Amino acid sequence: MGKSLRMKKWKFMLCVALACMMLAALPAHAEGEIKVVIEGEEVKFEKTPVVEGGATLVPFRVLFEKLGLAVDWNQETKTIVGRGEGATLELQLDRKAAVINGETVEMAAAPRVIDGSAYVPLRLVGEATGRLVNWDGAARTITIGAAPSAPAEPAEDFDFEGFYRSFLAAGNAEDLEAIRSMLHPESPLLEDEENWVAMLESFRLYDVVMELEDFEVLEENESYALIYSIEKLTNTNDLFYVDRRMKQLIDLVKDETGAWKVYMTLVTDMEYLVSEDRLTADADIDADVEKAIFDLLVAHLEAAEAEDPEAMMNTIDPASPAASETERTMKLVFAMVDAEYDLEYANVIQVTDTEAFVYTIQTMKNVDDSRSGRSKQVQHLRKQADGSWKYYATYTLSTELVEKFFIF
């Protein structure tokens, strides 16, 4: 059953729930929930912001005007150019590399056309003008401060790299107290309960070593520093793990005592380091277990086809840190997306007494506007007390998006 099912195709209309598990393939519309405040004034966009790849994208014209940037448009290259506030930005549609003051910067999400309007990453544009950008998760508010009135003064001679290496060392030692002590008291990271749950679970399952491969101080003054890092994460025990290399921007801010602390981190790019051979290799899986896992995949799809939120959530582990966010996003996707899905391939990579890992390849076509995408993922499943399997986490290894032609 399991081996033949791996290559069998299941085609379902309106398989919306899988979109909840592959957020990289579709932007999640904020539906007015994300508020943007620039210099103390809330900005009203004609169309709502969207969240994609962990980045908030907004219609570019209003944002550029509020930040004092003059706009040019290169029709031939589909490039938005902004000039002003001592900065020059070049953002090309559907390209993750931006050019800021002549230097190429990788973005978490590419500028793109959504519902006929060009959207750009808000944080990147705000920080390119020298402003401090903060995210308040509880209030779902992004705050952009005032433009610097004068060139930033150099900070005192502080070993930023040594400090950050100590921060990574605390993670490698799985020392939660040390990690918390190096966060700024007002950091939103301290309030992100889902993140702490996920971290503790990772500590329980894996022995991950974080290695700093590159480090650069991009900006610094008396109380603020912006750091760029490249880190490689490798698991050293036998449990399957998607090793990865990630690029990050880290905000460091001084606390009341004048000590430097981590205020916020933002992953701008993630490269998964797992071979296709490892993902597709035959594993010695019990036939009954394999059948139960494939039955879960089918149940997940059938619940989505029926647009049945209750049945969909029954396929997801309630202990998953992403469970509540998945349920919220799923309802939005049900209302927004009319799509056809095709699960091309599934292979069980590894099964333990409590964990299972499945490699899947799936395609999606939006019936309304002909957008289509293809996604490769690793599904982390967890065995429940009743012996059933449920989704715990999803890692999107890659996505390919094809969009219909838009006129700017």
Image: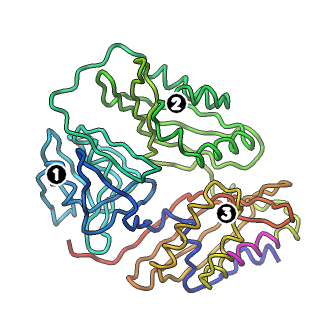
In the rendered image, which quarter is residue 237 located in? Answer: top right
Q: Nearer the viewer, residue 305 or 217?
A: 305
Amino acid under label 1? Gly
Give the residues drawn in magenta, as a range. Answer: 292-300
Image vertical order of residue 402 relative to residue 227, above or below: below
- Mark 2 — residue? 212
In the rendered image, which quarter is residue 278 located in? Answer: bottom right
Q: Nearer the viewer, residue 138 or 115?
A: 138
> What distance separates the C-alpha of mark 1 from that of mark 3?
42 Å
Q: Residue at 58%, 67% (x, y): give it.
A: 327
- Mark 1 — residue? 82
> What distance separates the C-alpha of mark 3 from that of mark 2?
28 Å
- Mark 3 — residue? 359
Q: Secondary structure at mark 1?
A: strand
Q: Earlier in the sequence, mark 3 or mark 2?
A: 2
Q: Are marks 1 and 3 in contact (CB under 8 Å)?
A: no
Q: Residue at 37%, 74% (x, y): give it.
A: 403
Is 188 displayed left or right of 68 in the figure?
right
Residue 185 % position (x, y): 48, 30
Is 293 inside the magenta-drawn segment?
yes
Count neighbours of disc 3 (C-alpha within 10 A) and say few if under 14, some if 14 to 19, many if 20 or more.
many
